[in-house]
Amino acid sequence: MAYKVEKATQIADNIFELWINAPHVAKNAHAGQFLVIRIDDSGERIPLTISAAKEDLVRIVFMTVGKTTTYLSKLKVGDEILDVAGPLGHPSEIKEWGHCVVIGGGVGIACLPILAKALQDAGNRVTGIIGARNEKLLLLADELEENCDELVICTDDGSRGFHGFPADILKQKLEDKNIDAVWIIGPAIMMKITSMATIPYNVKTFVSLNPIMVDGTGMCGSCRVTIDGETKFACVDGPEFDAHLVDWDELMNRQRIYPEQEKQSLELFHE
Ligand code: FAD
């Protein structure tokens, strides 16, 4: 069985959205879970977060960073993807927390709509904070306006919204209000720095880790991360973990172990 692309759109600079017909994933997907795709039988497997699910369709939003994401960005409506495995990983811890803040950086913003909606449906007040380098890289702001009680937009260069980082807004919110839980999803360095803000307030803070991941089912060990001194596999134990327990330096070092191979693979793809 192959999986048909039903909608393919570029939504920001180097960022694309695909809606894929994958009924078994769409019907069982929860906030925080991901899927693993393989475009064709010579392709590698890559993990992507489930950004939305509607009837038989599942949405992925991705940034073109290398060979497979570039190949994926070239798919058109009607094209087929060979494998879509999922939903994988543990869902986000959705319950009645009270006031939740969901923070997205860069392409990590794509993970927020399904999370914000699940938290709202569970009776929480949801504040969204999204940040990108500039306004051309901002995504899904209109959709998040609908799924959050309040949305703050930040850009590093001030081209839209607050001129600064989501961490600056989070600090203000922590000073002003009672916040019960925070989710931060984005590049590792952004998650590390932003999550430091909640330590003095002792607020439960989740991050969705994005180590290099291959099989997605706990067999290969590529996605191992250290949480509170213990080895965990992001694919089956996560991908969400308590931000204050993550060994960030190890995660960031392991994300950069194959730069030469990734460069060569992209060059060969362009030839
Ligand atoms: P490559 O040239 O192979 O690599 C470029 C960089 O991407 C690498 O340096 C590395 O940091 C990362 N990467 C490479 N291979 C993998 C891999 N197998 N697994 C994880 N990271 C890898 N990206 C999105 O744009 N949108 C998402 O919703 C999203 N969700 C993710 C969810 C999870 C649970 C994880 C672990 C990662 C997610 N990523 C997401 C990252 C995405 O998987 C990588 O961008 C993609 O695999 C890069 O493949 P490539 O061939 O295009 O790039």
Image (spheres, rainbow, N blue to C red):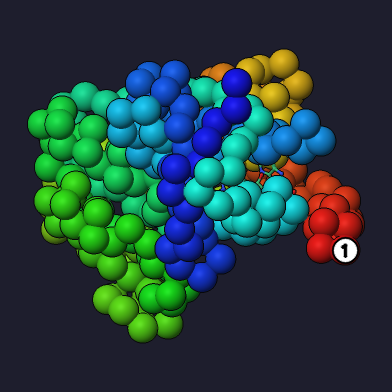
Residue sitting farthest toward the front = 78
Q: Is residue 195 visible?
A: no
At 81% from the left and 47% from the top, the residue drawn is 257
At 43% from the left and 63% from the top, the residue drawn is 11
Quadrant the C terminus occupies: bottom right
Q: Looking at the picture, how far across and down is residue 21, in whole percent?
A: 45, 32
At 72% from the left and 56% from the top, the residue drawn is 66
Above or below for 25 versus 194 = above
Q: Looking at the picture, how far across and down is residue 252, in whole percent?
A: 67, 49
Amino acid type for the residue under numbered disc 1: Glu
Above or below for 103 versus 30 = below
Q: Between residue 138 and residue 131, name the one nearer to us.
A: 138
At mark 1, the secondary structure is loop
Quick check: 258 left or right of 98?
right
Quadrant the N terminus occupies: top right
Label 1: which residue? 271
* Residue 270 sits in quarter: bottom right
Quick check: 99 left or right of 198?
left
Above or below for 231 versus 248 = above
